[in-house]
Image: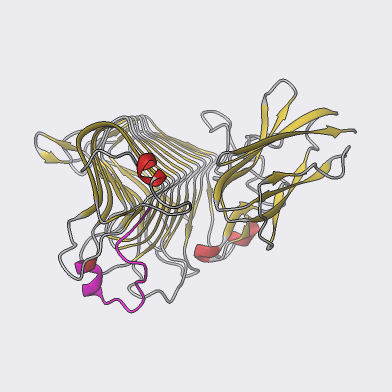
Amino acid sequence: MEKITPLLLQSELTPGSVPLFFRVSFRNSSYWKLSGADIKPRYTSGADGKEAVDLDGSYLTIENCNINFADDISGWTATDWVNRTGNGIIMDGSNITAFNNTITAVDHGIACSANNSLVSHNLIVNFRGDGIRGLGDDDVYEYNTIKNEYDVDENHDDGFQSWSYGSGGVGTGTVKNVILRGNTIINYEDPNQPYRGNLQGIGLFDGMFENWIVENNLIITDHWHGISFYGAINCKIINNTVVDNDLTPSPDPWIMVNNHKNGTPSSGVIVRNNIATDYSLTGGYTADHNIEITMNNASTYFVNPSGGNGDYRLNATSPAIDAGNGDSAPGIDKDGVVRPQGNNFDIGCYEFTDASEVTETNNPESFHLFQNYPNPFNPRTIIQYAIASRQYVTLKVYDVLGNELATLVNENKAAGIYKVNFNASHLPSGMYIYKIQSGNFSDVKKMLLLK
């Protein structure tokens, strides 16, 4: 590939234009970043096994890119899916980052064999293989959203899959020091989706897997494998929510710790603070403060447990509130809310908070952070902000010493005006600071709590 950085290429285009690539490949390369591009391979046949982006080297980054093999998949046959889609991003080497990319109409979304790498905040929608494959050591996979699997071939599809590879082949090595944090995996959103399959959630089938942390993930699937380890050593499965995509009694997604397929038992595994529809645990493990639910009683726990489009935050009377164990629990929840909010840690991927968000439909022309109202307040106030284009937004509250107290927003947002309700009933009177970061826009304001 010609050595032109995306920044230089963008500067040669008219304002608002986006670079368009057929495919991108960096081989034996270092210290390159590709940002803000459209990458759109188009095939009528022969796409199977090809990739839109091939990153092979070290210190490579792809971010804020739109990757797909088709803009419109309506009317596709199973043959179309196989012939016209390849893989989204392939990562080999070390210290490679895939951040905030949108990947659609693909076979596998992201396949990472690189070590010391980061796969973060990517959206993978409409795929026929695995959402993410993670095969390297010392990697972090966090805050990715993976949804809508199309079952068109013999592959057993997973939201996230890993396996080891050693001198004896698959299942004869060890994959070490991996973090799976805050990811969302949804089998399907539309029950009438064509070629709707049964997506396995997090499938770790051919260990060993050593020193893994699986925390704050939301798995919504219609398959037994919600989170499954086959051969785990000193792994932690903490504060996850694993639920069924529908109300049928079977299959009920489980959290499983099993022996390696060769019979080697798992050992030193912690299973704590999870909500799931089933558990299957063998070998050496510690399990405590877990809740087993059915989808028939899910409304007792969640705001709106309605399949792939549901809201699995805890409702105000959920038995999971304050019912957890803080030992080894993550310090924030899936939304970035600081744990604990009450007297103790909550169970599941979400910590209950009274903060809620309301969206107004008008599209602002500029970014803005408004003064909270009322101000002073006791104990609730509303913080309003405006974003002019789709951006990743964080809105956080701090004390005057700069200690982070709460994360009110931590996700991609479309253009609009938003209102967030903040409840400070657990805080003492005093001055507090709230800060927004949205792309290059940042602003800070003060608010006064008087009790």
Q: Quadrant of the N terminus?
A: top left
Residue 64 located left or right of residue 304:
left
Residue 423 located left or right of residue 412:
right
Q: Which of 348 and 36 is in front in this view?
A: 36
Visible residue check, residue 261:
yes
Q: In which quarter of the image is residue 59?
A: top left
Percent coordinates x, y for residue 27 in the rendering: 18, 38
| Residue in the picture at 37% in, 50% down | 37
Q: Which residue lies furthest to the left in this view?
A: 168
Instruction: Say if the magenta span includes residue 193.
Output: no
Instruction: Say if the magenta span includes residue 68.
Output: yes
Q: Residue furthest bottom?
A: 75
Q: Quadrant of residue 176?
A: top left
Question: Eyeballing the image, is 131 above or below 240?
Answer: below
Question: Eyeballing the image, is 163 above or below 22?
Answer: above
Percent coordinates x, y for residue 380 in the rendering: 82, 43
| Residue in the picture at 20% in, 65% down | 154
Percent coordinates x, y for residue 216 in the rendering: 50, 42
Q: Nearer the viewer, residue 361 or 299?
A: 361
| Residue in the picture at 17% in, 56% down | 49
Structure colour scheme: secondary structure
Question: Eyeballing the image, is 281 above or below 397?
Answer: below
Q: Which range of residues does the magenta coloring cover? A: 66-83
Count of marks, rendered view = 0
Q: Which of 336 and 439 is in front in this view?
A: 439
Percent coordinates x, y for residue 272 in the rendering: 50, 38
Q: Quadrant of the C terminus?
A: top right
